[in-house]
Image (tube, rainbow, N blue to C red):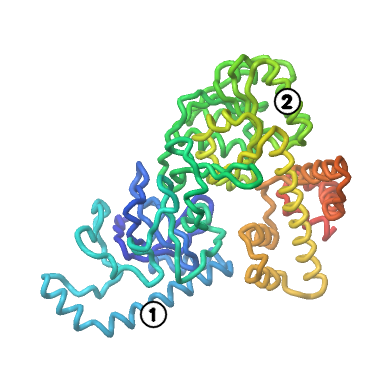
Amino acid sequence: MATVHLRIGDLVWGKLGRYPPWPGKIVSPPKDLKKPRGKKCFFVKFFGTEDHAWIKVEQLKPYHPHKEEMIKINKGKRFQQAVDAVEEFLKKGKGKEQGSHSDDKKSADGKGRKAAAKPMKIIEEDDEDPFKGGSSDKDLTDSDPEPSSVQPLVAGTVSGFKWDSSPVKDDPHFHHFQLSQSEKPASSMEPISKRLKIVEEDSGSTSIQPADSTAINGNITPTDKRIGFLGLGLMGSGVVSNLLKMGHVVTVWNRTAEKCDLFIQEGARLGRTPAEVVSMCDITFSCVSDPKAARDLVLGPSGVLQGIRPGKCYVEMSTVDPETIIELSQVISSRGGRFLEAPVSGSQQLSNDGMLVILAAGDRTVYEDCSSCFQAMGKTSFFLGEAGNAARMMLILNMVQGSFMATIAEGLTLAQATGQSQQTFLDILCQGQMASTFVDQKCQNILQGNFKPDYYLKHIQKDLRLAISMGDSVNHPTPMAAAANEVYKRAKALDQSDNDMSAVYRAYIH
């Protein structure tokens, strides 16, 4: 098969991770945006969105030869809108070409070149920049980023695009690489390291923004501290993979030892027990299923507590109740250890993509020591003060998410029961104020009968239960969460525990 060479201006299909191919155009990157290290890649602007990404050459295909193939495998509404945007772009381009054909030919003849009649003209991949020394404006539409329109959000951080002509659109397929973001005044940020920015809010919480996006340029400087990780489930596996990719030295342990094999092959070290991992490492993270598992990991035989020595850091990433966090913080501190809780908001896919949101609380110095780790695994992190606060915030977030998912499932099934099209219901929903990546992905999976776990149903039910209990402890009513919890309990009774949380849908149809 002949090698396909691409150039700036070419229309392509870009493939990112497990997401479907998406139509885009190769454009010039901003001058201050570094190119990823390693394999050759191009900077792509995706149609139907203002998102951009560095995409590896092997994940790119020319648009026209593969158009029919791609349309067959993706029937989504937003995908079709993106394809329509490509066709509109081509129509406009053809009109401009016809109107200026004679001028182009004269200009080209004067330079000893052919007129640019073929937009898919091939160049060599090894060319660093086909427009070096000249303007690339001819390859940009009105909505494409021009170097003059790119402004750094904050000195030292990743530069972001801010469009005057159109708002940023949330796209389910390439949100990982979205560069556009709301500007924040530089005065609200105080640097605590070359790779870290910190945002202080009136509430006393703190937000860490990575100075260089992991996904875009892989330019994180890993800490020289030895990292341990306990628990390689849906979330933990993605976290460890990203820590290793960014150059951290990681020792892993999992109750089912076979899960460690893949990470050993990627360069991780193996710990025989939680105690051994803690004794070998400077900072040890854990991510397990529930409060009992978190306690057993620390207090059980050969547990974390046996390996804690003065100065050792322990970071609890599991979503548990605040009482469990406070207990663990006390026992770790009693041995001279330093404790931080850092539960994460996200899913397996976001964990794999290094786009989690980390909520941290406890020892502030541990939070700062973990900066490169948090940049590797997430898009942002918040420091919320004393231990227990992150658990409280995480349970509130998951309570809202779980209740919302149950309501969406209820709407889908009511639409079906009243003779309405579920797909039309989703299309209307995704064009309104409730449109989101979460709604689009979960509903499409439901309609396709795909309940492969991205976030276990049993875990969201556990979070609802803990949130309701937290409400009881402060005499605060949670009737909506309580109703949703009953629906999830019914889904569990229907053997949906190990499916995705969207399988709550099945509680309404049985």
**Picture quadrant of residue 99:** bottom left
Question: Which residue position holds label 2?
Answer: 328
Q: Is residue 81 above or below residue 440?
A: below
Secondary structure beneath label 1: helix
Q: Position of residue 474 (x, y in %)?
A: 85, 42
Residue at which label 1 appears: 91
Q: Nearer the viewer, mark 2 or mark 1?
A: 2
Q: Residues within 10 Å of mark 1 (few under 14, many from 20)?
A: few
Give the side of residue 274 with respect to residue 262, left or right.
Answer: right
Left or right: 89 as drawn, with respect to 434: left
Would residue 286 be visible to someone looking at this image? no
The percent coordinates of residue 326 (x first, y second) are 75, 29
Residue 90 drawn at (x, y percent): 38, 76
Q: Nearer the viewer, residue 393 or 201?
A: 201
The amino acid at mark 1 is Lys
The percent position of residue 404, horizontal first and vertical second, equals: 75, 57
Question: Which quarter of the rendered picture does the C terminus lie within?
Answer: bottom right
Q: Residue at x 49, y 53 (%)?
A: 185
Q: Quadrant of residue 377?
A: top right
Q: Amino acid at mark 2?
A: Leu
Query: From what the image shows, is residue 280 above or below residue 381?
Result: above
Residue ID at (43%, 77%): 88
| Quadrant of the frame with the N terminus | bottom left
